[in-house]
Amino acid sequence: MVELKANQPRWRQVHAIIAERIRTGEYKPGERIPSLVALIEEFGIANAAGQKVMRALRADGLIRTEPGMGSFVTTPEERQAAGDE
């Protein structure tokens, strides 16, 4: 389990970690990211916090979620198209 700091909201810390993994290429464009359940287990966060992380990553344009399939890292083209709208 990843240690989180007590002085910051846990969901923001997890969001920053996942966003960094995307930016550094640990999670590559088009690749499925860990499920909500996996994030909850890895970081020891509540379900509501995990959902907040996923919403924030979608709002940032870093992931897209396909119902029944999971969440995937967006491609640079998808991010650019989202920014043009």
Image (cartoon, helix red, strand yellow):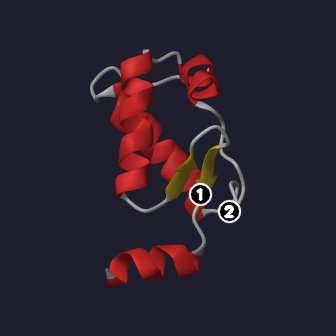
User: Residue reaching furthest front?
Assistant: 68
In this picture, is 58 found above or below 76? above
Q: CA distance from mark 1 to mark 2?
A: 5 Å
Residue 59 in picture, x, y percent from top left: 35, 55
Quadrant for residue 35, please give it.
Answer: top right
Residue 83 in picture, x, y percent from top left: 35, 78
Residue at point 56%, 81% (across, down): 77
Q: Secondary structure at mark 2?
A: loop
Residue at point 56%, 28% (across, down): 36
Quadrant for residue 73, please give it.
Answer: bottom right
Tell me the kind of residue under disc 2.
Answer: Gly
Horizontal arrangement in the rendering, residue 16 relative to residue 73 (left or right): left
Are the residues flagged by discs 1 and 2 in contact, CB closer than 8 Å?
yes
Tag on residue 22?
1
Tell me the kind of residue under disc 1.
Answer: Ile
Residue at point 49%, 59% (across, down): 62
In this picture, is 46 found above or below 50? above
Residue 72 in picture, x, y percent from top left: 62, 53
Quadrant for residue 22, please give it.
Answer: bottom right
Q: Nearer the viewer, residue 1 or 60?
A: 60
Residue 12 in picture, x, y percent from top left: 35, 37
Tag on residue 30?
none
Quarter of the picture holding the C terminus: bottom left
Quarter of the picture holding the N terminus: top right
Horizontal arrangement in the rendering, residue 61 relative to residue 66 (left or right): left
In this picture, is 2 found above or below 27? above
In this picture, is 24 found above or below 76? above
In the picture of the structure, the residue carrying the numbered disc 2 is 25
Count of marks placed on residues:
2
Q: Is residue 45 visible?
A: yes
